[in-house]
Amino acid sequence: MKKIYTCFACGFPIAFEETEVPAHCPGCGAPRSQFLEEPWCGSIEKRRIHVDPPEVDPNRDPFDISFHPAKDFAPLKGHGRTRRWVMGYQEGQAEEMRSFYQDIFGWDIIETENSDPENPTMYCATGPGTEDWEPRVCSFEYGFLTPYAKAGEVKPAASFVLEVKDIEETLKKTVEFGGKVLKERFTWEGQDYAVIEDSEGNQFYIWELKDEVPDYCINPVTRTGAQ
């Protein structure tokens, strides 16, 4: 018989046949003994049992990796997180660059739309999604190989990308806190970027995603579990 099981430890609801109930909560890892059960009513959304999620403990040991509610980064959801990396190659060396990472690491490398065929920007999928499925888009960290200069020109040092909500505000703070603005706002493949350097000389891109934050990053997620 199918039932709805709500974890008393974290409030995560799931629905399973009685013979297929997992031994631990997929949300927090609590044992089966912590599940509250009720009859299946056609939808998890219609369940009668609701458990308030635990509150954030501001004094939690940062080295304790057991389940805990995530820190709330509001109001700038996603601001400052690492999104992807970028590595450059000299114009005319696209195939050499592609072969290096395909042959050594087995990456899937795909030319992006509207790229220069001779010096394309190449999307790199670096790993499989599961043990038995190799995707054409990555599930692990991804990045791009992109032409940066003609032979003999200086290679840029920036190699990873941080998401920001306001490029201009971030550039202002960069200077205020001892960094440098290496390249003002520019557009690449329809997206706005800038390049900055921190107070120790480390360079990286910032990528403005003000209007592209998914709704689930702003509003609470309704966890539906298996239905």
Image (cartoon, helix red, strand yellow):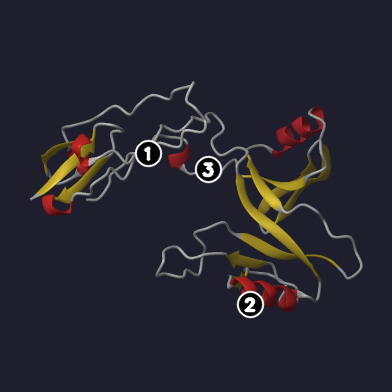
Left/right of residue 213 with respect to residue 25 in the rendered view: right
How far from the left and from the top, in percent, is residue 164? 64, 40
Query: Mark 2 or 3 closer to N-term?
Result: 2
Which amino acid does the dot numbered 2 rest on? Asp
Q: How far, Cα to Cα, is label 2 from label 3?
A: 36 Å
> Pointer 3: what residue?
213
How far from the left and from the top, in percent, is residue 151? 89, 71
User: Depth-wise, is mark 1 or mark 2 nearer the camera?
Assistant: 2
Which amino acid does the dot numbered 3 rest on? Val
Left/right of residue 150 with respect to residue 143 in the rendered view: right
User: Depth-wise, is mark 2 or mark 3 nearer the camera?
Assistant: 2
Q: Residue 209 versus residue 74: which sits nearer the camera?
A: 74
The structure residue drawn at horizontal position 63% and vertical position 59%, both measured from the top left corner, is 143
| Label 3 packing within 10 angstroms: few (<14), some (14-19), many (20+) | some
Query: Mark 1 or 2 closer to N-term?
Result: 2
Q: How far, Cα to Cα, is label 1 from label 3?
A: 14 Å
How far from the left and from the top, in percent, is residue 42? 14, 46
> Pointer 1: what residue?
221
In the rendered image, the vertical position of residue 127 relative to residue 92, given as above or below: above
| Label 2 packing within 10 angstroms: few (<14), some (14-19), many (20+) | few
> Pointer 2: what residue?
103
Q: Exactly how many numbered labels are in the figure?
A: 3
Which amino acid does the dot numbered 1 rest on? Val
